[in-house]
Image (cartoon, coloured by chain):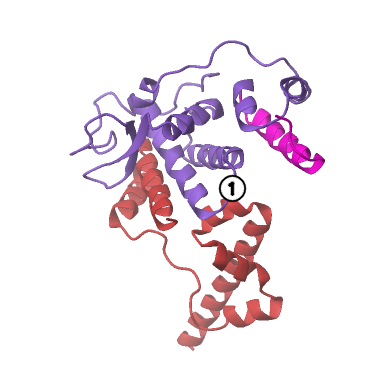
Amino acid sequence: MKAEQLRDEIRELNLAYLVLAQHLLREDRAQALYRLGISETVAELIESLTTAQLLRIAASGVLVCRFSFDEDLVWNLLANYSREGTVPAGLHAAILAAGQRAAAAV
Amino acid sequence: MRPKSLVDEAREIRLAGELIRLGARLQVLESETRLPRERLLRLYREIAGRSPSKGMLPFSTDWFMSWQPNVHASLFMNIYQALIRAAPVDSAEALAGAWRLYREQVEILRLEPVLSITRAWRLVKFFECRMLTMAECTRCRGQFVAHADDLLRGYVCGLCHMPSRAGKSRRAPPPTQH
């Protein structure tokens, strides 16, 4: 029962994520690649998915999205920012996050 | 040099229009599009509802070195570089796109944009002529805007090593026109 519920939650999240990705890509391609942190090739694939394929992928039991930041420093800054609302921590996190996007896109 | 075809011209007018709406000065439009000056002037008046401000643009890399401008410039430049590396976009589209993402990020942090789009454009130009570069902070490994001819070994960014007065004001001063 518990496992079934978790699978449902994963499926719903996958579906929401894939639909959001398609929506972002249609809206502004360059910005979408930045926001999603995906390559042109992956973007083309996601865009070309039919509704049936979308549903099948969402129900595959695998999460299609993952956490964006590898470094714990970014997580610490983000956590501090939301707790204390300190501007420098928020800016620092934003710079490091954008920098990781830039490094990943090389 | 006029745009080659009507389609090119329409594209450039759309782009120039977006840059005007984002607050770009005329010099930015002249540099980023191939539309003739009188057309740009007309477009500017139609969209902004006034004549473009006259006068020289600020020409100094030093502005980007003081604490607050440096932090904002570094945020913009990280976004800009991620954008141009992720997708084949031309320079005007990258400028407008990166600046909108920068403004969005700053708004989320409830700050005012310190970098106008014209300043952002200057910043990109300073990078292109290699007067400015990105320096890696030895503590946080983030990339920050720095003078290209400065000694960058052992560089520590303004956020890892904050000057005592920096970041005290909750809201930044209003963005300058330049």
Amino acid beneath label 1: Val
Residue B18 can be seen in this image = yes
Question: In the rendering, what colour is chain B?
Answer: purple
Residue at which label 1 appears: B89
Judged from the image, the secondary structure of the residue bearing numbered disc 1 is loop
Q: Note whether A78 is above or below A49 in the view shown.
A: above
| A105, B142: nearer the viewer | A105
Count of numbered tags: 1
Which chain's colour is red?
A: A
Magenta stretch, main secondary structure, is helix
| B34, A11: nearer the viewer | B34
Task: Name the residue rendered at 48%, 51% in the picture.
Answer: B85
Task: Name the residue rendered at 35%, 38% in the picture.
Answer: A86
Chain ID at mark 1: B
Task: Name the residue rendered at 73%, 16% in the picture.
Answer: B50
Residue range in magenta is B1-24
Tell me where residue A15 appears, x and y as whole percent. Answer: 60, 72
